[in-house]
Structure formats: C-alpha cells, structure tokens
Amino acid sequence: MKTKYFNKSEEEKIFFSTLKERVHNQLEGKIISYGDFRFWTKGLFWTLICYLSYSFLFSNSTDKIFFWLFYVIFQLSGLLIGFSFGHDASHNTAFKNKKANSVLHFFSFLTIGIDPLLWGLRHIRSHHLYANVEGSDIDIDKNPFLRLSPTHPWKPKHRYQAYYAPFVYMFTLLHSVFMSDWVYLFSDEYDWMKRGISKINLYVRFIVYKVFYFLLVLVLPIFFTDFSWSFVVLTFVTASAFTSLIFIIMLVGTHFFDGADYPQPEGEFLEHTWAVHQLHTSCDWDTNKGWARFLSGGSNCHAAHHLFPNICHTNYSEINQIIEETTKEYKQPYHHKTLFEMMFSHFKHLNNMGKSNVCDL
C-alpha cells in the first residue's frame, strides 16, 4: 500500500472539530462506544432468523422449493448478521473488550464465507484511511471486469459494463470466498496489511474459519438431507448470487457513485484533510428511514460511519442531521440520496467510466 499524507488545512480542521463537539454533545450521557439494547436486539433477531431457517433445511417435510427458500433466507439473514454485529465488532464497538469483539466478529461472518480477520484488517488499515485512493484503498483495486475509477485503464468491453455489471456482482461473495481471501493471505503484496499479526495466527484462524464455513453451508446439508449433492451445490451457488446482489445494492453506491471523488495525490499529499476526504468519497442513502438502518447495520449512514468509526452504528440516526447541517454551514460536501437514486447514480457512474474519452489519469 502507498502511504499518503492528508492536507493540514486549518479551515477543514476547524470544521471537523466543530462537528465532533456537536456530535458528542448530542450523544452525551449515552452508550456510544459499544453496543446498546437496540444493537443487541437487532443482531440477535437476525441470528435467530438465520439459524432457525437453517434448521428447517433438515426437516423431512421440506421439499426442494422450500429447501431453496430457507437456504436463501439463511444466507441473506447471515449477511445481515455481518452488517448488524460483524461490522461493529471489527471496529471494536460491540463490546468494551477487544477479545470479545474478535470472537463476535468471527462468528458473525460464519455464513458469509469471507475471512473476518483479513476483511477487518483491509477494511480498517486501508479503506477507512484512504477511501477511493488508487494504490492505497484495496477496495478500489483494479479488476479484470469493471472500470470503477478514472484511475483504471479503459478497455473496449467497458462500454457495456453498465449492462453486464449485475452478472459480475452476483459472484462477489463467491469470488471473495474462493479467490480474494487466498490472495490476501498468501501474497507478499499485502504484508503491510497483516503487519503485527503472527502468520501462525493468520493461517490457523483462516483454516478453522473456512472449515466451519464449508461444513455449515455445504457438508452438513449434503450429508444430512435427502437431496442430491448437485442440488445442494446449485442451491448454495444461486443463494450466494442473490445474497451478493443484496450486498452490492446496499454498499457499492456508497463510494462508487456519480459525483464521487477519486483523489490523486500530488506526490505523497492528498488534497483534503482526512475528515473532508471521507465526505468527498462517501454517499449516504435513506438515513432518515428506520428500515434502511435496520437492514444495513448503519452502512446507509456512510458519512457518519467514516467520520465516527468508533461510535456504535445504532447512534448514527441521532447525528446524521448534525453532519448535514454542519457541512452546509462550513460549505463542505455531503452526498445523500434514496437507495434507488444511489443505485441509479452508480450505474450512471459505470456508464461514464465505460466511455473511451474518460481516460485514465
């Protein structure tokens, strides 16, 4: 990863100091740095739905259609456990105790298949520092299918990426399970990300996690249901595709949208301070809707999460208005859309990136 340095603009520093003071005044006296009653109620709700639907897979009265439906619910609610519990645990905002957060993080990702430790390391050490910065944010690394940033090289196939992108997105989770995780673990290119974590710890956790995951999603359903292995595998693949689409719908437009900034530093220095950089590269959606916060684990309040990652996501509803008002007062950007508008903006962005005259920088 290329280390960058943020601008030290006094004006932008004053803006963020004011914002932090207003936010902490609003939340004074409340539990904000770890999970409260709302946090645990929501997370446990999705956990109950997830494993209850999983238990129905083994019922003798379950036919193929219901097996597939229960499997989809199992996978989808498992993803929502990751949103509700796992994301906060990776930021140590579920429990006061870091080890307890680590345990919750591990089990919250169990039905998703993405190694939680590797995901947490790249999410915090790369993405949260340098969102949308080529070479520093792993989430914007070049890929062989889509041109997501003007810093990526253009190819003729990108003219059509707005049309074939949904099919690519259907394989997001499977790609992470069977390819990305292995690259992040074994490639020397990502040693910076794993610094401070012993290789034995990385490898043992990785193996244990993958064994648990495959036992849960494939081995047990194959051996302890009356369905053929081929049907179980097909169910696993199609459920993963559906879950991937839901994952993408809620997240991809929060950074890849029409109007997002893709900063290119002059030498080692970025244009803005860290806080203002987050505002230029993030988009909120439906922050005033309870259903959106309930499903997304606060990921719909992306500006709040990037600016205040050490505050549990169940508090974001109380600070979104403060962020909007303070950014307006200090003439800083704040991107907010409905979910539909964000997805439309994302595909508009894909279409723009597919034009040959939008050359790489």
Image (cartoon, rainbow, N blue to C red):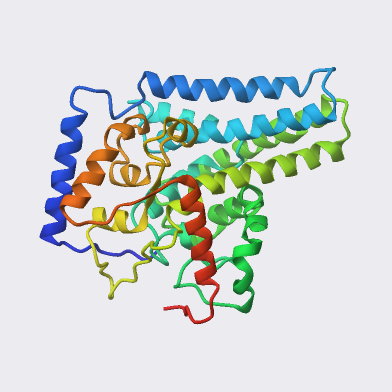
In this rendering, would 240 be left or right of 221? Answer: left
Instruction: Report x, y in % for residue 78.
Output: 59, 32
**Residue 110 is at least partly visible in this image:** no
Q: Based on the displayed image, in which of its 4 quarters is residue 131 positioned? A: bottom left
Q: How many marks?
A: 0
- Residue 209 lies, in percent from the top left, at 60, 37
The vertical placement of 320 against 340, above or below, is: above
Query: Compared to 333, does 75 lie above or below?
Result: above
> Residue 280: x, y in percent?
31, 59
Quadrant location of the C terminus in the rendered image: bottom left
Identify the image quadrant of residue 285. top left
Q: Nearer the viewer, residue 224 or 256?
A: 256
For the N terminus, give its image quadrant: bottom left
Q: Percent from the top left, x then y, of residue 252?
A: 50, 52
At a point 43% along the width and 48% down the height, the residue shown is 123
Q: In percent of the image, x 15 and y 31: which residue is there?
A: 25
Q: Is residue 318 visible?
A: yes
Foreground residue among 359 and 179: 359
- The residue depicted at 48 percent of the width and 25 percent of the height is 43
| Side of 117 where 335 appears, left or right | left
The residue drawn where x is 43% and y is 34% is 293
